[in-house]
Image (cartoon, rainbow, N blue to C red):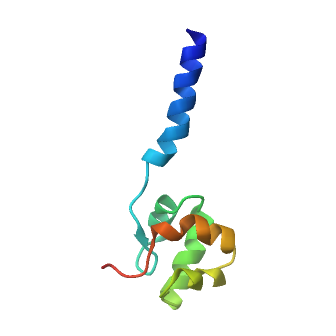
Amino acid sequence: MKLKSIFIISFVLGVAPCAIHAAPVNVNSADSAQIASALPGIGLVKAQRIAEYCQKNPCQKSEDLLAVKGVGPKTLERIQQDLRFSDQ
């Protein structure tokens, strides 16, 4: 019984993050809270940097975010599928 419980918990923890996926976010119009909740691994501090950068320099493509402190190639790869640059 204990082994079955461990298996179920492991399965749920392994599958749940894949099942919970926020909608893509337009970084040019979103605030820091929206960015942090939509982009995996992005906390409020980095989200604030992204929001401020995009307000001053609207982004056209994901690579534009490499100019934001704390956003490197690995971070960009992780968040790329959730990025939008217009409301279309």
Residue at left offset 64%, top offset 68%? 75
Quarter of the image for residue 73 reads bottom right
Q: Quadrant of the C terminus?
A: bottom left
Residue most toward the bottom? 57
Residue most toward the top? 1
Q: Which of 18 and 40 is in front in this view?
A: 18
Q: Is residue 59 above or below residue 1?
A: below
Q: In which quarter of the image is the N terminus?
A: top right
Q: In this view, does 55 lie above or below 72?
A: below
What is the total number of numbered labels drawn onto the structure image?
Answer: 0
Residue at left offset 42%, top offset 69%? 25
Residue at left offset 59%, top offset 11%? 2
Question: Relative to 87, is 82 on the left or the right?
Answer: right
Point out residue 37 in the picture as x, y percentages from the top left corner.
48, 59
Question: Relative to 58, is 7 on the left or the right?
Answer: right
Question: Relative to 26, is 53 on the left or the right?
Answer: right
Quarter of the image for residue 69 reads bottom right
Q: Is residue 68 above or below residue 9?
A: below
Question: Relative to 19, is 8 on the left or the right?
Answer: right
Point out residue 40 in the picture as x, y percentages from the top left corner.
55, 58
Point out residue 84 in the picture as x, y percentages from the top left corner.
42, 76
Residue at left offset 64%, top offset 81%? 66
